Image: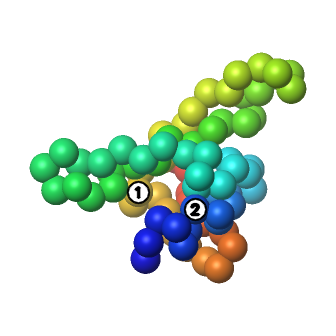
């Protein structure tokens, strides 16, 4: 699967249903030795206080992704 095929998918937490934007909004962290995706930094909109306030990021391990569907990426937070 190519990044261009999954970039528009919405990232959702299975545990509480919170939305974390699209994959385009996230940053990916790679393993230096292998080039494999280690984790994704997704915006944590739950900590946002106001419209113009900056947002924090939540790091989710690639192993926490449960399903990549047609329109959504589902992960389970810890």
**Tag 2 secondary structure:** loop
- Position in image of residue 67 (x %, y %): 54, 73
> Eyeballing the image, is 74 above or below 17?
below
Q: Earlier in the sequence, mark 1 or mark 2?
A: 2
- Position in image of residue 72 (x %, y %): 66, 69
Query: According to the image, label 2 marks what residue?
Result: 7
- Tell me the distance, in whole angstroms, between the alpha carbons under discs 1 and 2: 15 Å
Residue pictured at 55% horizontal, 37% vertical: 58
Quarter of the N terminus within the rendering: bottom left
> Eyeballing the image, is 60 above or below 36?
above
Front-lying residue, 54 or 4: 4
In the visual, does 32 lie left or right of 28?
Answer: left
Q: How many marks?
A: 2
Q: Is residue 74 visible?
A: no
- Position in image of residue 23 (x %, y %): 58, 55
Residue pictured at 23% horizontal, 48% vertical: 31
Query: According to the image, label 1 marks what residue?
Result: 62
In the visual, does 26 lie left or right of 54?
Answer: left
Residue pictured at 69% horizontal, 73% vertical: 71
In this rendering, the label closer to the viewer, 1 or 2: 2
Q: Is residue 22 visible?
A: yes
């Amino acid at each position: 699967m190519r990044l261009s095929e999954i970039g528009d998918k919405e990232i959702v937490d299975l545990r509480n249903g919170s939305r974390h934007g699209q994959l385009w909004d996230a940053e990916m962290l790679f393993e230096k030795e292998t080039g494999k995706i280690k984790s994704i930094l997704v915006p944590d909109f739950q900590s946002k206080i106001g419209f113009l306030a900056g947002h924090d990021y939540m790091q989710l391990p690639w192993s926490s992704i449960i399903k990549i569907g047609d329109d959504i990426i589902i992960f389970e937070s810890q």
